[in-house]
Amino acid sequence: MSAGKPFSPANPPASVVAAEALGAATPAAAVDPHRLRQALGRFATGVAIVTTLDARGQALGLTINSFASLSLDPPLVLWSLRRASGCFDAFCAAPHFAINVLAESQVDQSQLFASRCEHRFGASWQRGAHGLPLLEGAAATFVCATDAHQEAGDHELFIGRVLAMRESHVPPLLFYGGRYRRLGALV
């Protein structure tokens, strides 16, 4: 909104005009999920595998691209999980989790952890702090204490307090438009 110009129906901010031009008057329930997913795919993301231990101490993990930095002080990160996921209860009960930001060479691991395969952990991981599974070769790894989680639509938002981290200087794996990508030239 421009400074000095009060909002009124006769003088709406540009974002309101643009939203109306896009048909924002349509009720949210009428948003086509397929088209929404397609439009959201225009936002490039990194790819990560979040890992934890279930109640029996077994390694558990899945591929996510909903990872984000939330705060530097205190150090917090955020990710989300579909409430219908078979891993949902285990992550809700877990006091700790790890975020493994994948390197561009780890497409196969991303696909494996995105599948319904029960045996996802091969030889390329080790136990870290709190016994958490940490993937070798990741671009970055964050060991977190579960700080909070809350329902958000058909997902649960998880907030983790970063307890430890490591990084390597390998290019990260990217996801854009429904496909894996590599970093391109600087602009």
Image (cartoon, helix red, strand yellow):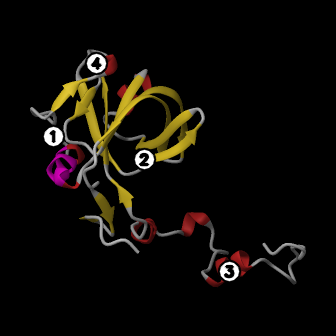
What is the distance, in whole Å, between disc 1 and disc 3 at their CAs? 44 Å
- Precedes in sequence: disc 3 or disc 2: 3
**Residue 10 percent coordinates (x, y):** 87, 84
**Residue 137 percent coordinates (x, y):** 20, 41
**For the magenta stretch, what is the residue range?**
105-112
What is the distance, in whole Å, between disc 4 and disc 1 at their CAs? 22 Å
Question: For the residue labelled by badge 2, is the local secondary structure a helix, a strand or a loop?
Answer: loop
Q: Are marks 1 and 3 in contact (CB under 8 Å)?
A: no
Q: Nearer the viewer, residue 143 or 35?
A: 143
- Circle 2: residue type: Phe
Q: Quadrant of the N terminus?
A: bottom right
> Mark 1 sits on what residue?
117
Task: Residue at 39% x, 70% y: name it.
Answer: 38
Task: Residue at 28% x, 40% y: name it.
Answer: 62
Category of crowding for the residue at label 1, using alpha-carbon neighbours closer than 10 angstroms: few (below 14), some (14–19), many (at least 20): few
> Mark 2 sits on what residue?
67
> Mark 3 sits on what residue?
20
Asked whether 111 falls inside the magenta stretch, the response is yes
Question: For the residue labelled by badge 3, is the local secondary structure a helix, a strand or a loop?
Answer: helix
**Residue 104 percent coordinates (x, y):** 22, 55
Asked whether 92 falls inside the magenta stretch, the response is no
Q: Are marks 4 and 3 in contact (CB under 8 Å)?
A: no
Q: Are marks 4 and 1 in contact (CB under 8 Å)?
A: no
